[in-house]
Amino acid sequence: MIDFTSFNLRDACSVNTNEDGDRFVGVKVEEDKAHVYFPLGYRLPDDDRLLRRDIRMLFGVLSAFGYKEDKILKGSKFVQAHPVDFPIQAYLDVIDYFMENNGHYYVESEKKYKSDTKGKISWARTIKNQRAFIKNGVPTYVKFDVEYQSPLENQLITKIHKFCVYHAYKRLGWLYTNQQIIDPGITYSDGMSRSFLQELRKKKNNTQKDRDKKLFSSMIAMIEFIDNRKLDKNYYFGTDNFEYIWEKLIDKVFGEPNKEDYFPKALWVERYGAGAGIPTHALMPDTIMIYTDSSGKEKVYILDAKYYRYGDTHKPEHLPESTSINKQITYGEYAERKYKLANECLFNAFLMPYNMNKNLFETNEKFVNVAESYGAWRENKKNYEKIQGILIDVRYLLLNYLGNHDKDKEELAKVIEQYLISR
């Protein structure tokens, strides 16, 4: 178990280079050590409070966009993989509830009544139990039967919460505090897990409070996870293939839901076998962004998310290769013909990661146009044939992938067109 008192969060964080052997993005915990790996180009904040927030954000992105096979836990020394998806958000939700409740466990309350001069009055009980005197012909009471809540400290649900909070802190408490959580002394067993799950499902079905429903769902996920494996000291949560998440983030922020309309079909039709006569799938661009400018003109931007190192190294060999360039031109040519798009309404761009606060380009913009590619075999008279190389600040994208992105689309559109409209 990690010693919280000596744990230094900043020393436990690093940004990978996306080179061989340094591609993992996520968290690894081994025995009494934990380390968080951020993606290529990420800027770690100076403030520890913001750093903790960024780690939470990273976990959220990995949960939202990662593949299950990326998020499996590995056992001792990370050698043997177990096909169990670690419910990291459930662990975080359990800790959050505990923290937001000022370090108190979930406790049910029983409705009781007492005689008092103030409080929520039960008139039925008051009329039955309290003596009234008549004033001006109207019954008047000195005291009333009023409601109050009596905590049920020994209920099973409180015991379950103590168990879940302790085990959540054992795995992820270092992200929140330097204080240890007291072991409630609950010895786990198969029989106990059945009673835990039965109680949690009953409470979840009977509660109307969204906050409590979320807590019960999170504890169910934790118990089911613990049921499926040993309480290992070693685990990881993350991926070696962050390029797929980069693509999904770009599509989430800038993309249109109907991008399949822009897929050019290059077909094979087999003559033999079960697939005879069935066309193959079309080419698929990563992201289609549509933006309407201030004059009301609708423009189409074909975007290819490239999790390449150019934004970190400024080396030409780390730019997209010829096959990618030619593929983007094909996408543009197809879109132009199918939708009869004018030259000033169709554009192409590669989107690559970088750190806007520390880079070799002497810029601090969240979106920056740094290069242009084209096919040497074409005349390249059209905008879509000149594919723009755009760098995007990684931290900005990860922290802002939710919500409305109209402003981001407007800014990206201007950066893509920046060197084209001046020609």
Image (tube, grey):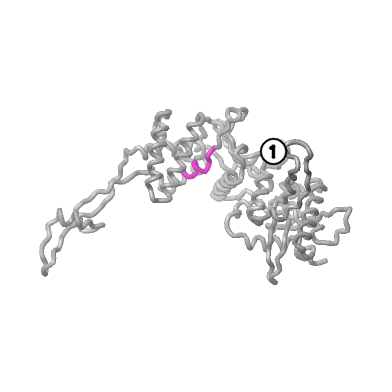
Q: Which residue is drawn at the image coordinates 76% and 50% (left, top)? A: 265
Residue 217 spot, x, y in % from top left: 45, 43
Q: Which residue is drawn at the image coordinates 72% and 64% (left, top)? A: 299
* Quarter assignment of residue 145: bottom left
Tell me the quadrant of the picture where the C terminus can be found: bottom right
Q: Secondary structure at mark 1?
A: loop
Residue 322 visible in rendering: yes
* Farthest bottom residue in view: 295
Tell whether 78 sits left or right of 351. Answer: left
Q: Is residue 89 magenta?
A: yes
Q: Is residue 164 above or below residue 296?
A: above
Task: Please name the predominant secondary structure of the magenta segment in the image.
Answer: helix
Tell whether 191 sits left or right of 237. Answer: left
Dot 1 alpha-carbon crowd within 10 angstroms: few under 14, some 14 to 19, many 20 or more? some
Residue 389 spot, x, y in % from top left: 77, 54
**What is the three-letter code of the residue carrying label 1?**
Asp
* Quarter assignment of residue 293: bottom right
Q: Is residue 376 magenta?
A: no
Along the line of sight, the residue nearer the viewer: 421 or 251 = 251
Q: Which residue is mark 1?
A: 22
Along the line of sight, the residue nearer the viewer: 77 or 376 = 376
Residue 33 spot, x, y in % from top left: 57, 34
Tell whether 385 sits left or right of 96. Answer: right
Along the line of sight, the residue nearer the viewer: 224 or 54 = 224
Q: Is residue 163 above or below residue 49?
A: above
Residue 274 spot, x, y in % from top left: 72, 37
In the image, the segment drawn in magenta is 86-93
Residue 417 visible in rendering: no
